[in-house]
Amino acid sequence: MLRRLYFVLPDVESARQIFDDLLLARISDRHIHFLARSDISLGDLPEVNVLQKTDIVHGAELGMIIGAVAGVIGGAVVVFFPPGGVTLQLGAILLAAIVGAFFGTWVASMKASAIPNSRLAPFAAAIESGQVLMMVDVPLHKVAATKELVERRHPEAAAGGVEATMPAFP
């Protein structure tokens, strides 16, 4: 499992220098992401993607749960109170739960793709003031060394905390 480290940087030039230092420390560029105000060009620095910028993951998780529960309830109503003398098995409840989970995931993720990531809310004021947010995903055994590297080489970078767990896939 990876941990996500957050750092607030004063400008793009500082972000570029830290990016180079992290690459030299053997942190892959696919594990380093930057977010800045829309009118600030990051150049060739890797920007955040839609999964990191929006609440799509959280929305999909919540939609799956709500959809599955609604499917179980709807399936149970249909099984125990069948329409027009139709006989249904208990497997209909399972099928309704699966369909509900998929539908809930789809609808909620579409809606959540328009909502900013709630985990980035503490950094919104800094980003709007022109600063750059850097997210670095590292294994647990590299967290301390990565924080120490950034703090030692770039005192202008403000540590923004560590996110508890990240999925193993990017």
Image: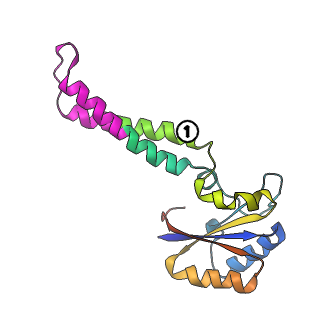
* Residue bearing mark 1: 110
Q: Tag 1: residue type? A: Met
Q: Nearer the viewer, residue 32 or 61?
A: 61
Question: Does residue 92 show up magenta in the picture?
Answer: yes
Q: How many marks?
A: 1
In the displayed structure, 18 sits above or below 84; it is below
* Corner quadrant of residue 30: bottom right
Residue at (62, 45) in percent of width and height: 115
Residue at image location 16% in from the left, 14% down from the top = 85
Q: Which residues are magenta?
A: 68-97
**Residue toward you, 91 or 132:** 132
Q: Is residue 20 left or right of residue 31?
A: right
- Work out whether residue 61 or residue 128 is closer to the camera in this orientation and state it: 128
Whole-percent x, y for residue 126 in the image? 75, 62
In the image, 161: left or right of 83?
right
Can see residue 36? no
Circle 1 packing at 10 Å, graded few (<14), some (14-19), many (20+), is some
Query: Residue 147: image x %, image y %?
Result: 63, 80
Q: Quadrant of residue 95?
A: top left
Residue plotted at (57% across, 83% down):
144
Residue 100 shown left or right of residue 109 in the figure: left
Task: Evaluate whether residue 94 shows in this view.
Answer: yes
Name the spot of residue 113 as percent of width and height, x first: 59, 43
Which residue is found at the position 55% from the left and 39% from the top? Answer: 110
**Dot 1 lies on which element?**
helix
